[in-house]
């Protein structure tokens, strides 16, 4: 914790604050510390228990994803209110856990929109890598009826799922683009030069174009 405090930088904290993350440690420096520490599950648990955002990010870099029980991951997700902690927990840990599918189903239907966004993120992973048994038309139905008015983080996760359905599944591409055009979610999102817009119709069209060039 003393080492992390020494890595604190006020400019980094200001940048992170704009994204809702309350820490000032550059992520590159966190990764350097994690590389030195290597995998240490017990230390990861101790760092997580501090509640400090930088410590929790470091914990997620040095933990053993398969070392967490299902209920432990559920509690961790509900505690992870900082967006970066939430994102890393889902992508670096839960996706590699044997409990991923069980948690996907539980979180997908959760009344807390932040928890539900994790369920959607795991569903997007399935859309891309293991779509068998997923009801894609039903997912599109839910997106069509709920995405427009969903809270920000849930809306973002649903939009990502919409885009991946359109990108990965040609049979549903036209409908995915149509839903995106009608709902116009993230249509005016500021996008840096050289980056792909998160607006689903643009995102889908660009990724499909790249795949065929």
Image (cartoon, rainbow, N blue to C red):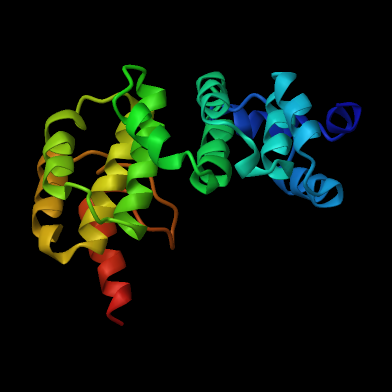
Relative image position of residue 14 (x, y in whole percent):
65, 29
If the image is split into quadrants, where does the C terminus sit?
Answer: bottom left
Relative image position of residue 44 (x, y in whole percent):
75, 33
* Residue extending farthest bottom: 213
Residue 138, quarter of the rendered image: top left
Task: Between residue 170 and residue 18, name the one nearer to us.
Answer: 170
Residue at (18% x, 41% y) in the render: 139
Relative image position of residue 36 (x, y in whole percent):
86, 50
Is 76 located above or below residue 158 in the figure? above
Residue at (28% x, 38% y) in the render: 158
If the image is split into quadrants, where does the N terminus sit?
Answer: top right
User: Is residue 104 left or right of 4 when viewed as pictured?
Assistant: left
User: Is residue 41 left or right of 108 when viewed as pictured?
Assistant: right
Residue 15, quarter of the rendered image: top right
Relative image position of residue 178 (x, y in whole percent):
9, 50
Residue at (12% x, 31% y) in the render: 145
User: Is residue 79 left or right of 186 when viewed as pictured?
Assistant: right
């Amino acid at each position: 914790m003393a080492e992390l405090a020494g890595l604190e930088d006020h400019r980094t904290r200001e940048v992170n604050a704009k994204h809702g993350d309350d820490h000032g440690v550059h992520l590159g420096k966190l990764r350097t510390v994690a590389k030195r520490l290597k995998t240490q599950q017990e230390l990861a648990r101790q760092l997580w228990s501090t509640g400090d955002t930088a410590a929790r990010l470091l914990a997620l870099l040095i933990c053993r994803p398969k070392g967490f029980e299902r209920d432990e991951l559920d509690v961790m997700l509900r505690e992870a209110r900082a967006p970066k902690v939430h994102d890393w927990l889902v992508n670096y840990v839960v996706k590699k856990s044997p409990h991923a599918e069980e948690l996907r189903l539980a979180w997908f239907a959760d009344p807390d929109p932040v928890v539900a966004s994790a369920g959607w993120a795991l569903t997007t992973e399935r859309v891309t890598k293991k779509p068998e048994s997923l009801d894609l038309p039903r997912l599109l139905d839910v997106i069509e009826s709920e995405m427009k008015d969903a809270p920000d983080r849930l809306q973002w996760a649903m939009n990502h799922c919409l885009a991946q359905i359109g990108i990965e599944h040609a049979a549903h591409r036209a409908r995915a683009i149509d839903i995106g055009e009608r709902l116009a979610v993230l249509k005016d999102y500021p996008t840096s030069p050289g980056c792909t817009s998160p607006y689903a119709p643009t995102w889908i069209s660009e990724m499909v174009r790249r795949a065929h060039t």
